[in-house]
Amino acid sequence: MSQNWHKKGESWFKTFDQVRPIIEARLYTYASLRLQYPDAPASTLSTLLGTAIETSDTTSVQERWVTRYGSELQNAAIIEKVMRSLPDEERRLIEMRYFEYARWGYICRKLSVSRATAYRIRDRALMAFAVEFGYLSARPQ
């Protein structure tokens, strides 16, 4: 994809292939949190980030949770935003692969596409996440 270096915090990335495992890890982490806290929408919980008290005397269970999982909540808000913007085919593939842990053969049958096409669909979707997380600067058309 892009041959330019991109900075994210203190890390430097050169290509989409270097960013892909990071995005996939964030999606799997998000799926794990959704299993642990199925009734906790990130968009609602992320509003608590500004009010969370980061001291040991925090009494609220919710405040302690937000303090512990603040970065995951920020990632979850980004993931939910991107998921809403993805075309149906890309969104469904991401849901099956990263949230339902489906194998590629199953995904290909459900979407009626070849494995190579499924990988291209995945890469288009992951590029949207990479751009939104700030790892890459533009999504190819």
Image (cartoon, rainbow, N blue to C red):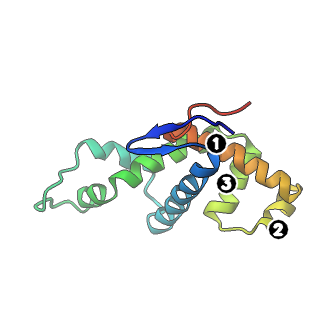
Label 2 with label 1: CB-CB less than 8 Å: no
User: Could you say which disc has been placed on residue 127 in the image?
Assistant: 1
Q: Amino acid at mark 1?
A: Met
In this view, the residue in front, 1 or 77, is 1
Disc 1, SS: helix
Q: Residues within 10 Å of mark 3 (few under 14, many from 20)?
A: many
Tally the numbered discs: 3
2 relative position to 137: left or right? right
Q: Amino acid at mark 3?
A: Ile
Where residue 31 appears, as percent x and y from the top left, is 54, 62
Q: Residues within 10 Å of mark 2 (few under 14, many from 20)?
A: few
In this view, the residue in front, 122 or 63, is 122
Q: Amino acid at mark 2?
A: Gly
User: Could you say which disc has been placed on residue 105 in the image?
Assistant: 2
Residue appearing at x 63%, y 37% in the figure: 3
In this view, the residue in front, 3 or 60, is 3
Residue appearing at x 47%, y 44% in the figure: 12
The image quarter in which residue 84 lies = top right
User: Could you say which disc has been placed on residue 94 in the image?
Assistant: 3
Disc 3, SS: helix
Residue appearing at x 48%, y 63% in the figure: 38
